[in-house]
Amino acid sequence: MNTSVANTARMLWAALRMLLVLTVVTGIAYPLLVTGIGQLAFHDKADGSMVKVDGKEIGSRLIGQSWNIKGTDKPDPKWFQGRPSNSGYDPLATGSSQLGASDPTLVKNVKTAKKQVAEFNGVSEAEVPKDAVTGSASAIDPDISPQYAKIQVKRVAEANGLTVAQGEKLVKDHTRGRTLGFLDQPRVNVLELNVALKELAEN
């Protein structure tokens, strides 16, 4: 009996030591190591890829945001607009509308949005690209297609006292190609584009 109790005690003590060791290694040492490597090698990305203007953080280049007229739900003509957001660009409530491509509600919403985008930018509905009227799976996509950026150039240039040529160059300079030449699609980061727009308009 005593031998059985002693063996059980030894097994429990060994299990407890293993638990403590694994807790320290996987719960403390490993996270600290990975965080340290991230901060040293990828400081900007590890901190959320934040964009700063005059030393103040104004957003992350990884998360889309609203460019509406302050205090309203109307898009501000001074800024390039991002993709529609089902969550209101809330990073804590991401997700698409979950409506299928043939859903009557989605079809109606897209038609309405296409008309609004065309009128807002002074272009024909045929020129409005898909990403201008449909949200992404996350609802906080920070990028738009070069096509969507281009149809906004005239409106943005006029609202900021710039020439169309200046606006077109701005879009061209901020268009990123495919990753490794074949992954993803060409895209324009809306936050970075609008930061550059503000600097250009103020100079």
Image (spheres, helix red, strand yellow):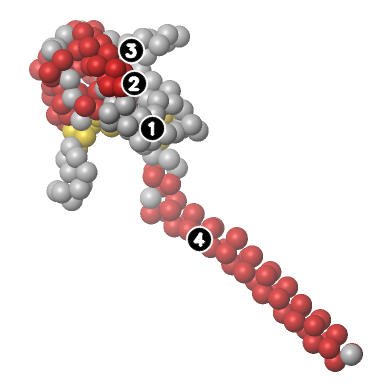
Q: Earlier in the sequence, mark 1 or mark 4?
A: 4
Residue type indicated by callout 3:
Pro
To which residue does mark 3 refer? 75
Q: Mark 3 vs mark 1: give the one in front.
A: 1
Horizontal side of residue 79 vs 21, given as left or right: left
- SS class, disc 4: helix
Q: Mark 1 vs mark 4: give the one in front.
A: 1
To which residue does mark 4 refer? 33
To which residue does mark 1 refer? 98
Res. 68 image quadrant = top left
Crowd class of label 1 (few under 14; some 14 to 19; many from 20; radius 10 Å): few
Q: CA distance from mark 1 to mark 4?
A: 39 Å
To which residue does mark 2 refer? 105
Q: How many marks?
A: 4
- SS class, disc 1: loop
Q: Is residue 41 above or below residue 135?
A: below
Res. 153 image quadrant = top left
Dots 2 and 1: beta carbons under 8 Å? no
Q: Quadrant of the C terminus?
A: top left
Dots 1 and 4: beta carbons under 8 Å? no
Q: Earlier in the sequence, mark 2 or mark 3?
A: 3
Q: Nearer the viewer, residue 27 or 123?
A: 123
Q: Earlier in the sequence, mark 2 or mark 1?
A: 1
Q: Is residue 91 above or below residue 158?
A: below
Q: Is residue 153 above or below residue 143?
A: above
Crowd class of label 4 (few under 14; some 14 to 19; many from 20; radius 10 Å): few
Dots 2 and 3: beta carbons under 8 Å? no
Q: Earlier in the sequence, mark 3 or mark 4?
A: 4
Residue 76's spot in the image, x, y percent? Answer: 32, 11
Q: Residue at x 81, y 81 (%)?
A: 9
